[in-house]
Structures are given as structure tokens and as C-alpha cells.
Amino acid sequence: MQHLHRPVFIIILTGFIVFSSFAQIGGRATYGFLDRTNSARVAALGGNILAIHDNDIGLVLTNPSLITAEMNNTLAMDYVLLPSAYNYGDIMYSRSFKKVGSFVGTFQFINYGKFTMADAGQNITGEFTAGEYALTVGWGRKLNPHFSIGANGKLIYSQLESYHSFGMAVDVAGSYTTTDDIFSASLLARNIGLPIVNYIPGQTEPLPFTMQAALAARLKHIPVRFSFLYNNIEKWDLTYNADTVTTTDQLGQSTSTTSSKSGLGGFADQLMRHIVVGTEVTIAKAFSIRLGYNYRVRQEMKLNDRTGFSGFTYGFGLRIKMFSISYARSTYMAGKYNPNYFSFAINIGQLSKKKEPKVEGK
């Protein structure tokens, strides 16, 4: 299998260039739930991918190049609870094969809850539900002690009242890790694909394609790790349309003004909208405290009279032998609409191992 490593790696790198060249980056995208953060650890560090290479199965849904053989026979669950009517999460399972590589299967869901149905005359006619689902199979393999590659294949189904859509997508990723695991880096292209069955026949919507780069660095003698994420490589201007404000004077005439910055300040603002930073402090190799900051979220979600902690995230994680538990909370807006993330993983293989019986005389 060694002679296949170089061609496979070249194919994946070519995919980054080819797909980014024709991906639709403007307008709205369907299947937006694919871009949501599920893992509590990822959420606590502020982003929606990480490059940390420490056999955490919760990271591979968005970065399949982190799939390793050490995850074999691991079961994991993520659940995100919002103060509104909907929630989402996933369930994952990993299996490794010597000659093929390691695989992680994930069932991802989002439940939007129940809605009141009404006609054009505002007469209530009943209720309807909405939800979206994705079945993902991820594959990862080490090319050598430093480089690894991975890919996700996704089957996506969306049901919004009487409208249905079905699509397919892939993610491709590559990672580099130093021998001592002190530094790691990843490059990803996510959600490459198109709907096969559209909500409305003849009207095709793009998927939320994006390219991302992530770095992670751990201090050698202090249990502190820093993570860095650069989002949306394929698009420079991430300014939200709401930054354009329309006002109406006494004569009923409308005037539009844009709050965007210019010059050096404008460049810094645009650059920071791409960047997410996080810090993780580990105590006794078992308990971790995590903090993150997302500048773009803060700029888009803060209230003019009450900025609060918009854009900041925090959480903790606990690892005890074959068990792993994590919690995180993201602050989108002061006072409300802030999700709580819960993650749980167990290595079934280690749990099922039986202790060898003691032999007398030894």
C-alpha cells in the first residue's frame, strides 16, 4: 500500500484547487446545518474545526485527516441544546482495518421543532415539522509519521414542511504533525457537492462550501495548547449584509449607509473576521479548561447597547481511562440564544478487554 500514498495525496491536493475554483461562494447555501459545530471541545475553542492530533473522535466530523487507528471501536455522541425550540447533534462510531485505513460513521441530525401552518388569510390550518439529516462515512490514513489524509462522504436529506431535498457532498483534508505532537496543521475543503433532488424542481442551491486552515501548538514544558483557525480561504470579504443600514427621513426618502471600515482599519477588520483563536489548559492529563474567541461572531451578534461576551466561548473536558466527557457554552448574544454543548465518548474496545487471570507461582 505504500506506493499508493503519493498518488492519493496528490489527488486530494488537486481537489483543493479544482473545487475551490468553481465553488459558489456568493448568496445563500442550503444544508446550512452541515456547518454547525457539534463537538463541545471544538465549540469551547471558538471554531468549527481543529487541527489537534490527540485521537479525539469528536474532531473528525469536520477534519477527517485526524482519524486514527487508536480510535478503533470508539462510540461517541454530541448534543447541542438551545434555549429555543430546536436542537441538534450526532452519534459516531469508529472502526479500523490494517490494509485499508480507519473509518468513522456519523449520523447527524437537526430538529427544528413544530411550526404553526396558516394560509394567505392568516387562518391557522394545522402544524408542520422540519428537520435535516446527514449520514457521513469518514476515512483517514497516515502516509508517514508526519502526514495524514482523510475524506468524508455525505448523504444529506432535508424535510421542511412538504418540501424535500436530497444531496451528496464530500470533504477532503490533509494534516501535518511533528513527531512529538507539539505542533500540528490541517488544510480542509468542506461540503463539495450539490443537491440531487431540489426543494423546488429546477431551482438548485449551492452547498455551504468552504476552505479552512487550522494550526495547533502545545508548549513543551507547560500543559497549555493554543489553536488557530483561518476560515473561508476562498472568500476575503465576510462582511454581513446587515452592516448596510437603511434610514427614512421625514419626507419618506430612504438613504442607505454602510458601516464598513476603510484603510488599515478596514483591512484589519476583514482579516480578523477569518480568524478564530482558542486556548486549552490541561491539569493532571485528565481535566482541561478551554477558552475561545471568534471576532466575526462578536461583530455580527453583539447588541449596540450591550456587547457582553458575544464571540467568547468556554468549556471543560474530562478524560478518565476509556471515557471522555466535554461541555461548552457559546455566547452569541447578550442574555439569550446561547447554546450548550455536550459530548461523550467511550472506547468500547478498552471496556471489553478482560484482565488476564493470575497464574499461581508467578
Image (tube, rainbow, N blue to C red):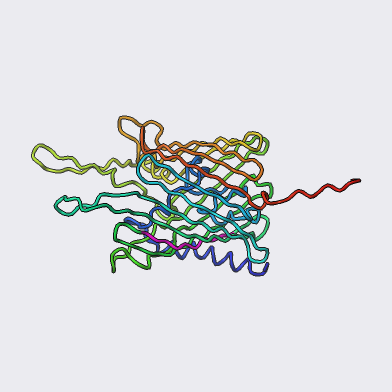
Does residue 202 appear to the left or right of 330 in the view shown?
left
Q: Residue at x 33, y 30 (%)?
A: 306
Rendered location of residue 98, percent (x, y): 68, 63
In-front residue for pair 192/155: 155
- Magenta span: chief secondary structure: strand
Residue visible at 24% across and 52% down in the picture? 126
Judge left or right: residue 139 versus residue 338: right
Residue 325 x %, y %: 56, 41
- Point out residue 232 in the picture as x, y percentages from the top left corner: 43, 52
Q: Residue furthest left?
A: 251
Q: Quadrant of residue 255?
A: top left
Which sits in the foreground, 288 or 229?
Answer: 288
Residue drawn at (28%, 44%), measured in percent from left and top?
A: 242
Q: Position of residue 293 (x, y in %)?
A: 46, 38
The quadrant of the rendering that contains the N terminus is bottom right
Q: Which residues are magenta?
A: 149-158
Vertical position of residue 326 compared to residue 121: above or below: above
